[in-house]
Amino acid sequence: MSLPPIIFEDATLIAFDKPSGLAVAPDPFDRKRPDLTAAVRAQFGEQVANVHRLDAETSGIVLFAKTKPALDFLSGQFQSKTVEKRHLALVVGAPGEDTFVVDLALAPDEHQRGRMHVGGRGSQAAVSHFQVLERFGAFTLLECRPLTGRLHQLRAHLAAKNLPILNDAIYGGETKLLLSSLKRGYKGRADEEPLMEQLALHAEDLVIKHPETREPLTLHAELPHEFAVALKYLRKFAVPRRKR
């Protein structure tokens, strides 16, 4: 498989703009499924190691270390929670407040493989900060800052607040973003396709300290095309109350 676009590369690290649908690590339940780590090692060597992960369905920044010292230094930042992570999420629903915090421990769902739920046996602390960026009636664009890095953390936390991320097949229900639901007098195709089909969650910014310079390094991944197009139509027809 071809590698995703490279956001940043030097002698110690390399960052990619991962598309939605690509797993970062091997899938234990499907060994034939392509994963980014295997593709990166095939091109750059077995010494390259993944520093952190994103859900397969989430798009955006994924960071790899090229050397063992760089891996140790970068991993330490994630473990000590000094890395700044900023995601964008388009959710179904309207928060009552412009800023809110979700502090709910998460554990694997014993009844549904690959799903997390709040509380329960083996739950681990999970904290996420959210801020409303734009409101579009039935949809809201949120800035998400996870302070911890649990599996599906933002997805599970937002679902627990009754604000599921658009197109989240595990946590989000059946809501689709259709142009016909936004535009008055819509005269498009009868078999209308949604404006966006990928999970509406994107890892947009990551701020780390560089392994060699020890200076802050900001990595940025632009919104995927269909995410940007969906926002364009929401801004045009849903009349957002707040602009970024």
Image (cartoon, rainbow, N blue to C red):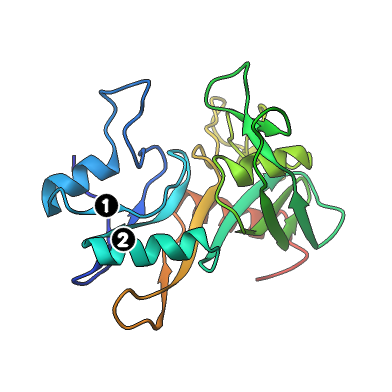
Q: Residue 190 at what x, y percent from top left?
A: 57, 26
Nearest the eye: 79 or 168: 79
Q: Position of residue 97 (x, y in %)?
A: 85, 59
Per the image, label 2 sits on a secondary structure element best described as helix
Residue 18 percent across, percent down from the top left? 36, 50
Q: Is residue 30 left or right of residue 94?
A: left
Q: Residue furthest right?
A: 96
| Residue 211 visible to the viewer | yes
Q: CA distance from mark 2 to mark 1?
A: 7 Å
Label 2 sits on what residue type?
Leu
x, y (%) of residue 238?
72, 54
Q: Is residue 21 left or right of residue 114?
A: left
Q: Which residue is mark 2?
A: 71
Residue at (22%, 49%) from the top-left corner?
A: 3
Q: Secondary structure at mark 1?
A: strand
Q: Is residue 87 above or below residue 8?
A: above
Which mark is drawn over residue 158?
Answer: none
Q: Amino acid at mark 1?
A: Ala
Q: Which residue is mark 1?
A: 49
Residue 90 appears left or right of 10 = right
Tell me which residue sits at (13%, 54%) in the image: 44
Say left or right for 66 vs 175.
left
Camera-nearest residue between 46 and 191: 46
In this orientation, does residue 171 appear?
Answer: no
In contact (CB < 8 Å): disc 2 and disc 1: yes
